Image: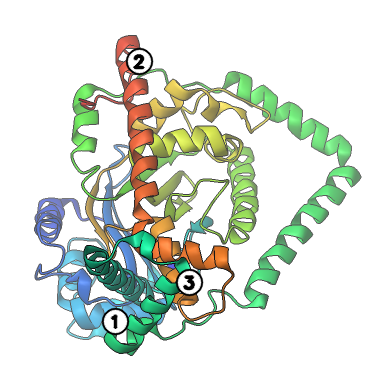
Amino acid sequence: MRHTIMTIITEINPSKRLVLEQILGEIRLDLLRNPFIPFSSLSLLHFASFVISDDKKMPPLLIFENNFDGDVSSYLDELIIHAGDGIDWIYQCCTDYIPSTRNQNLKTFLLANVVRPSAFHIGNVGRAAKDIAENQKLRERLQLYLDQLFQKVRPESFSPFQLRKNLQKFVRTHVPPDLSKPLPPHQTATDKLIPKARKGLFFFVAGVLTLMLLPIVIILIFMLRYKENRDPVEVQSPSVSEIEELIKTENQITQNRLANITTIKPGSFRLILLKVVLFATNLLARTSTKGKLSDIPSIHFSHWSIINKGTQLLFLSNYDGSWSSYLDDFIDKASPGLTGIWSNTQGFPSTRFLILDGARDELPFKAFARNHQVQSLVWYSAYRDLTVQNIDKDSLIREDIFTSLSEAQTQECVLSCYSFTLKQKTDESKREKSYCKKSETLRKTKRCGKEEDCS
């Protein structure tokens, strides 16, 4: 199953800004049944959002993000069928859009304003939105069956093998075939091999060119250090009111949403360097197919795009857990890569040799992230109560329920059906306790990027 990350970016007509915000506000209040975009009718969709970029130096932009299954054309056809009139109303608030009764005109306009990601990551590779929903239903049916069974007989009365036999019998007799039929492989051998080959070729060529052009590389390193020593750093932390406004929409469900827009440092040197880093990041991300990016296990979909004619960097991410725990993962597990990307944008904490320091400096990095965070006026998730790891385990249950397993694998399969969420809750509790301690420390230093109540 191929996934697509598509972002449509259009300039807003200032005279219709309020009308646009009213429409988006109505959508936000009822994501499933609003008259503009009934998101639940879009069978291919995983996540979607609307963000307004409001840089005082540039015209306001409407950013419409979509993460979905299949190709762009098929998804836009489905979107227009179910929400054509609503999409038409939204884009009447943007410049260069000519309303028409013909849906083809709308599709042409949307395609003309698609911005492709420069680098992206997908946590649950190869799992269609429809399959994720069905896998969850299957697991919930099995959990309910086990709950009822254990009300009559103690769990220790069964061996894992016996329990699995009971589960299999229950599935055959009480579960609709659509929920239990085998799924196709998440990826083919070719899907796995090509990204690895591209990554290997890129780093081989990069290594050869570095040796061949060593004097030029040394000059470029000196240029980079010269610029790093003189780049201004953001020292102002976000205000309490700004933080409070951002956190109004956070921690409402299992997942959270992050949208950041930063200004790329002036000059072609930084823009070219950023493009090279994003290209390398994308190659690495294409080989991260087990739910993790740089050992971060909580990202569903995320991507970077260079926008506004090469002047700004857009980062959009759908992730599990709190904002603080997500940023902690950035710092602890992926700081060199993130520093390599964001060190090319204005105000980022001081860096050395492109990837050192930067995001490792926790307080300035979190303040930078908050300062450039943009509130999502609309955000939709097709599976609001599932983490990346939940989705993986639901998928494994369906894949393994009728396969031949060892004793250890059988025990794991049965436990996944009944109690795998316990570990998730425990892990999240630990993250929140850690976050509360850090938040209290930050408040005491008055350099806080967090002002939330941890009571």
Residue 176 is situated, as x and y percent measured from the top left of the image, at: 29, 87
Residue 229 is situated, as x and y percent measured from the top left of the image, at: 62, 19
Mark 3 secondary-structure assignment: helix
Farthest residue, direction top:
445
Mark 2 secondary-structure assignment: helix
Q: Which residue is mark 3?
A: 161
- On the question of residue 114 being in view, the answer is no
| C-alpha span from label 3 to label 1 | 44 Å
Residue at 47% across / 81% down in the picture? 183
- Which of marks 1 and 3 precedes in the sequence? 1
* 86 on left or right of 425: left
Which mark is in front, 3 or 1?
Answer: 3
Crowding at dot 2, Cα within 10 Å, few <14 / some 14-19 / many 20+, comes out as few
- Decide which of 215, 341 is in the foreground and name it: 341
Rendered image coloring scheme: rainbow
Q: Are marks 2 and 1 in contact (CB under 8 Å)?
A: no
Residue 154 is situated, as x and y percent measured from the top left of the image, at: 30, 61
Q: Which residue is mark 2?
A: 441
- On the question of residue 40 being in view, the answer is yes
Disc marking residue 78:
1
Mark 1 secondary-structure assignment: helix
Residue at 56% across / 39% down in the picture? 334
| C-alpha span from label 2 to label 1 | 49 Å
Q: Amino acid at mark 2?
A: Thr
- Decide which of 334, 279 is in the foreground and name it: 334
Which mark is in front, 2 or 1?
Answer: 2
Q: Are marks 2 and 3 in contact (CB under 8 Å)?
A: no
- Which of marks 1 and 2 precedes in the sequence? 1
